[in-house]
Amino acid sequence: MNIQKKLDVLIKQGYILENAPMGNYTTFRAGGCADLLVVPGSEAELAACIALLADEGLHFMVMGNGSNVLVRDGGYRGIILRLSDCCDTIRGEGPAFEAGAACSLAEVARYVQARGYTGFEFASGIPGSIGGAAFMNAGAYGGEMKNVIRKVSLLRRDGRGSYQLNIEEMDYGYRHSVLYESGDIVTSVSLHLEEGNREAIADRMRELAQRRNEKQPISYPSAGSFFKRPQGYYAGKLIEDAGLKGLTVGGAQVSPLHAGFIINKGGATASDIEKLMHLVQALVLEHSGVMLEPEVRIIGEAPWL
């Protein structure tokens, strides 16, 4: 029995796609195909699939809404598990809330605002899921996930067993958590927020949305800020100072609006985006002596290798 048939036995509520074009499932709207895209319909199906894939020794990764992933044009020779149909429930009336890993940050922000709780406004415009945000300690406008998380529920990388880590055990740093080493999978995130004024919270969310709309290229596909912030610098400022705003490779471009963004100007391939990344890294290093590191996770096979 091949692996797809074995997965078919496990997937009752979700679905499986063969040769799935990952440009349809990532915010860059570019990239190659995954051998299999599996969308579990429940947390139990997710755990069963992971246990099977681990037993078979097969390459797999778990993905939220694809906001921080680029799949190379050569494709991903393995299985991608997408959480869109499971781990997608928000619970709580405050001050404690629990959000499934697949919930978008915007969705969680609206939920807690409607109940009059503050502290999550910074995340309301970050493109991504709360699971991915907890994994990498996402942040914006002076806020970080580590400031609002109480604990994180996890599924072990082999699918056998679940557990929780509190905020201290997550070992949060800048765009880092203990999960980078363990590889375990976020299934839900528990938040603890402060009571506030609904209208004031909504005003703050609108203010941040306006700032984002004015300063970020939200009308083009991208993965948000492409590079990590180097210690003592800002990536966008280094790129702008090197004169690279508008730099283009194929359909990929350093945004003329915000140099920290690489955008899909139209018809960009994953290779265009990755080649532009390398070019920006080389030119910034030459200009300032700083080597930029991508925040975006790049996976799969490069067709030129």
Image (tube, rainbow, N blue to C red):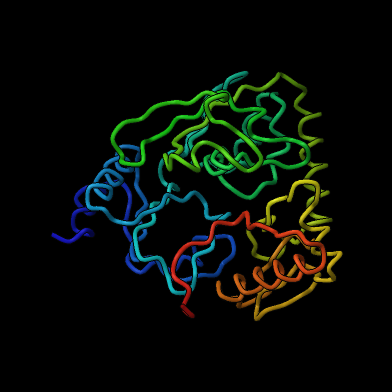
Q: Position of residue 162 (x, y in %)?
A: 36, 30
Residue at the location (65% across, 78% down)?
251
Q: Position of residue 101 (x, y in %)?
A: 49, 39
- Where does residue 83 sit, x and y in percent of width and height? 43, 47
Q: Residue at x 83, y 68 (%)?
A: 242
Q: Residue furthest left?
A: 1
Instruction: Decide: is 172 above or below 208.
Output: above
In the image, what residue occupies the spot 75% across and 21% down? 196
When the figure is inspected, residue 43 is found, relative to residue 166, above or below; the finding is below
Where residue 17 sits: x, y (%)? 34, 62
The residue shown at (61%, 76%) is: 272
Q: How many tags in the picture? A: 0
Toward the viewer: 235 or 12?
235
Quarter of image, res 110: top right
Q: Is residue 290 above or below residue 12?
A: below
Front residue of this view, candidates 104 and 161: 161
Quadrant (top left, top right, bottom left, bottom right) of the N terminus: bottom left
Quarter assignment of residue 269:
bottom right
Query: Could you tell whether 200 is left or right of 153 in the image?
Result: right
> Residue 43: which quarter of the image?
top left
